[in-house]
Structures are given as C-alpha cells and as structure tokens.
Image: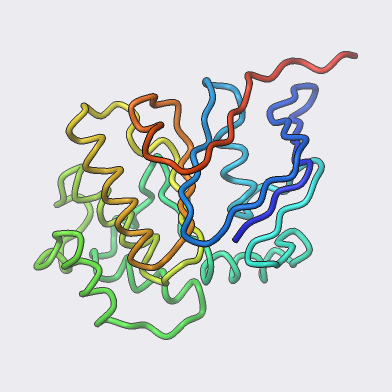
Amino acid sequence: MFELKDVGHVYGSHLVLDLPEYIEANPGEKWLLRGPSGSGKTTLLHIIAGLLKPSQGSVHIAEQDIYALTETDRDRFRGQHIGIVFQQFYLLPVFTVLENLLMAHYMAGVPQDKARVQQMLATLGLAGREHAYPSELSFGQQQRVAIARAVVNRPQLLLADEPTSGLDDTRSKQVLDLLVSSAREVQATLVVASHDHRITDSFDHCITLDEQVELPA
C-alpha cells in the first residue's frame, strides 16, 4: 500500500527525520509510528500524506510516486486515496457536519454521495447530527466527524496523528477501536503516529524513530 525508501528530512541545520531503510506496508495492515517528542513522527506522517516533500528518499502510495506529481495532482490524489485525522480536527466552522463531509467529496473531485455520508454518520453514532455545526458538538463528536471525513471517500490509507494524546484509558481505547474499525470498513491500511505506550500492542507493525540532533557545521 505504501513504500518508503531512505526517507529523511532537514529543517535548516536540524535533522528532524532519518529513516535510512526500505519499508513496505500492505493493504489492511496496522502500523504504529513510535518515538519521543522531536523524533519526527508528525514529519513522517506528513511526508506519507503528501503534505511535506522529504529532503531525501522516495514515497510511493498505491504504486504512485506521490512527489513526482504536481502539487495540484497530489492534492487530488490525496483526496481520493488518503484519509487524515489531524490532532486539530480542522472542521470548517461555517459548514454543518453534512457539508463538512460532502466537502471531502468535492475536494477529491468525486461525485457527492449523501447516502454514503449518512451511512458513515450512523456507523459512528452521529445519526441525527448531520445539520449541526462543529461548535454545537462535543469534543468526542467532533473527533468522530473528523474520522468520518477521513474515511468517507474510502481511502486506501488512513493516517492519524496522536489521536489518543491526553485522553484517559477508556476514551483512548474507544478512539483507537474507532480508528481500527473505520479502517477495516474501507479495507484501508492504518498508520498512527503516537508516543502513547498504552496502544502499542494493538498494531501489527511498528516504525520506531529516535530523537534527532543538530547537524555538524
């Protein structure tokens, strides 16, 4: 489903990611990006998502070299093949829940499918909330809308950045179960970036990153 080869990234004189190896993930697998703060977990997640071109290495998603695409084509490819749940949910406040999810169809250039949206909302326990605005939802409901938006286009790859950070044990398990079941529903490969040791055993595969350092002058 995705392939990483010798991926690394530098900001200024600071090495923020160093992954000098070949990694291949297959459809339906669950991958954990693990490491302390500053090890490059979010950077790698953004690179896999096509949001940040690495300083070195290659990234293939569904056999496509995503950084060989133009920025416009990469945005379209992302919308059609990759779902992302950010730490900040980035729900559009002037749009209802229904409109936020339909916007995901529009941005991917696929036909809007209200029946699909309603199905996702029902699956995630949000039936009847389609006309609510984000400000009218609880934190947990907003998180579920963000997950619904990430999977509404049936992506092949589902990414989540620190989804259990700051949550108690019960809520952490609920969120992880929700991500796993949502990925399974669309048969997506799941990749979660986290330093939460409570969730380690829930993943088939793991990429462990070390804290990076200043480069020598």
Question: Is the C terminus in the top left, top right, bottom left or bottom right quadrant?
Answer: top right
Image quarter for residue 111? bottom left
Residue 131 vertical placement versus 22 (above, below):
below
Q: Residue at x 77, y 51 (%)?
A: 58
Q: Position of residue 194 (x, y in %)?
A: 45, 32
Question: Is the N terminus in the top left, top right, bottom left or bottom right quadrant?
Answer: bottom right
Image quarter for residue 125? bottom left
Q: Position of residue 91 (x, y in %)?
A: 34, 54
Q: Residue at x 63, y 19 (%)?
A: 211
Residue 87 vertical placement versus 51 (above, below):
above
Residue 35 vertical placement versus 56 (above, below):
above
Q: Position of residue 127 (x, y in %)?
A: 12, 67
- Asked whether, in this view, residue 91 is left or right of residue 25, the answer is left
Q: Position of residue 165 (x, y in %)?
A: 34, 29
Going by the picture, which residue comes out furthest to the bottom?
Answer: 111
Going by the picture, which residue comes out furthest to the right?
Answer: 217
Image quarter for residue 123? bottom left
The foreground one among 199 and 143 is 199
- Asked whether, in this view, residue 106 is left or right of residue 91, the answer is right
Residue 160 vertical placement versus 1 (above, below):
above
- Asked whether, in this view, residue 63 is left or right of residue 179, the answer is right
The coloring applied to the image is rainbow
